[in-house]
Amino acid sequence: MGKLAFGVAVGWAVVSCTIAGILVNRAVRRRREWFRVLGVLKEFEQGCATSITKLRKVVDAMTTEMYAGLATEGGSKLRMLLTFVENLPTGNEKGIYYGIDLGGTNFRVLRVHLEGQRSTTLKHEVERQPVPQHLMTGSSEELFDFIASALEQFVSQESNDYESRDQGRELGFTFSFPVKQTSVSSGLLIKWTKGFAIEDLVAKDVSECLQRALDKRGLNMRVSILVNDTVGTLAVGRYHDEDTVAAVIIGTGTNACYVERTDVVVKGQCFRKPSGQMVINMEWGNFWSLHLPRTTYDIDLDGESPNPNEQGFEKLISGMYLGEIVRRVILRMAQESDIFGGENVLSKLSIPFILRTPMIAAMLEDDTPDLIEAARVLEETLQVPEIPLKVRKLVVRVCDVVTGRAARLAAAGIVGILKKIGRDGTVGKVSIKMKSRQMRRTVIAIEGSLYTNYSRFRGYLQEAVVEILGEDVARNVILRVTEDGSGIGAALLAARYASVRSGRPR
């Protein structure tokens, strides 16, 4: 009996040792896997680093490309398109003006009431309508007849206090598709995007097509302005503040425009006018420089996109892509270790764009100790309950790296514009104190959900502007949120040009 008990004891000891060995090996393996995951994070952080030295190189590259784009067509990744907008709102405009905003699957008609003095608020009415699917691929006549019909109904609701309802009305048209501008009120469609495919409008004057539809319905309106949403944002910014010199949109996509001296626009010498200035549409989403920090995840995203080697800057800073970059990084982490603990996590994370930028914002701005919002987003997206806190912290860190890089690069782009127009405090060899006294107050109008709705992104961008310019110069630069530039801006420009034509005081 004693021998039997001894044998059993020995057997249990062997089993226990074996189990212990298995558990130890498993723990060691998991620790190694976790270190590999941390290695992925460290490598990504290093690849996304935006030191002040690197940012200043991006500033210089942006300025250099701006000069090149103004010199010749195709001379730069920045297209630096002439908008022919030489007069911006002053705040003295009076009357009722209309705008149409077509830039996606919805379009808007709007009316602004201007009383001849600059105001922090604009009295306006807006009506939004979806564009029926069949009109997005039909004929240009059908599309513009639909728009004209909606405008006709909107005009009919005009209040009776309008002094001369029978007089002609000025209409600003925001058309946010690639256009070759030929005048302030006309432009030829280059190509459709965003799901539109109306072939008979390509290479045609979009304003002329809209005007024909208005005339057909007997609407006494003239399409006097054709702009994109960025120029509209600049117009709204200038209406509210005469020191506004540029506008930036940072949302799903990104772009910038600014006021340039016409004497430096070499490629547009034949278009020079007495005003001496013109708004330039940079199309800065296509900016590229070897100084931009790009990782293997960015390279793969670009290669798999519908437009490889194009819109490089946009793919680093805009809301369309930030969530997708985060997805690619945490997919790599999940391949290194089963950090999420779910069987189907890899298949979920392999779905492109399953993580959207609003999700990234929600996780990054979660200030609860247990990152409750981050847990909710990950569980709903990956369908895995009870994701460990350390994994949530890891994902939030990836979100932070992606957001910080995007915001700081956007800041460098803005400073690049300031440097081009001599508003960065570097002109002349004078002391910093003297520079700050000489610096003119400079306002940048900013619109777009990534900047306006994402406080962490906004904070990083503002900090980087100060870091690059220095506090003495940066205090003269105001980044001001502007609302609804894509709609109201075109109507304000219609009002401004009506004032210019009538000879009313500027």
Image (cartoon, helix red, strand yellow):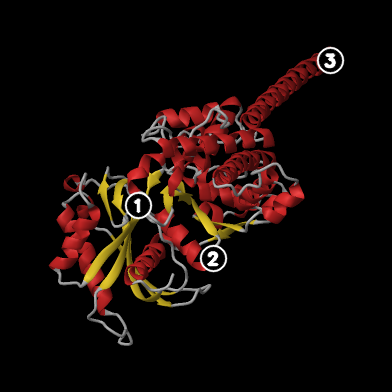
Whether 198 is drawn above or below 330: the answer is below
Image height check: is 93 above or below 433? below
Residue of label 1: 176
Q: Label 2's element?
A: loop
Foreground label between 3 and 1: 1
Point out the image quarter for the C terminus.
Answer: bottom left
- Under mark 1, the amino acid is Ser
For disc 2, the marked residue is 241
Q: From the viewer's side, name the closer residue of 237 and 374.
A: 237
Residue at the extreme left of the image, as rendered: 216
Residue at point 25% right, 82% down?
165
Label 3 with label 1: CB-CB less than 8 Å: no
Seen in the image, is 343 located left or right of residue 80? right
Q: Amino acid at mark 3?
A: Phe
Provide the secondary structure element on which disc 1 rests: loop
Q: Residues within 10 Å of mark 3 (few under 14, many from 20)?
A: few
Amino acid type shown at disc 2: Asp
Q: Which residue is mark 3?
A: 6
Q: Position of residue 309 (x, y in %)?
A: 42, 29
N-terminal of the pair, mark 3 or mark 2, is 3
Q: CA distance from mark 1 to mark 2?
A: 24 Å
Mark 1 or mark 2: which comes first in sequence? 1
Q: Earlier in the sequence, mark 3 or mark 1?
A: 3
Foreground of the two, 203 or 145 = 203
**Is the C-beta separation of discs 3 and 2 under 8 Å?**
no
- Toward the viewer: 28 or 176? 176
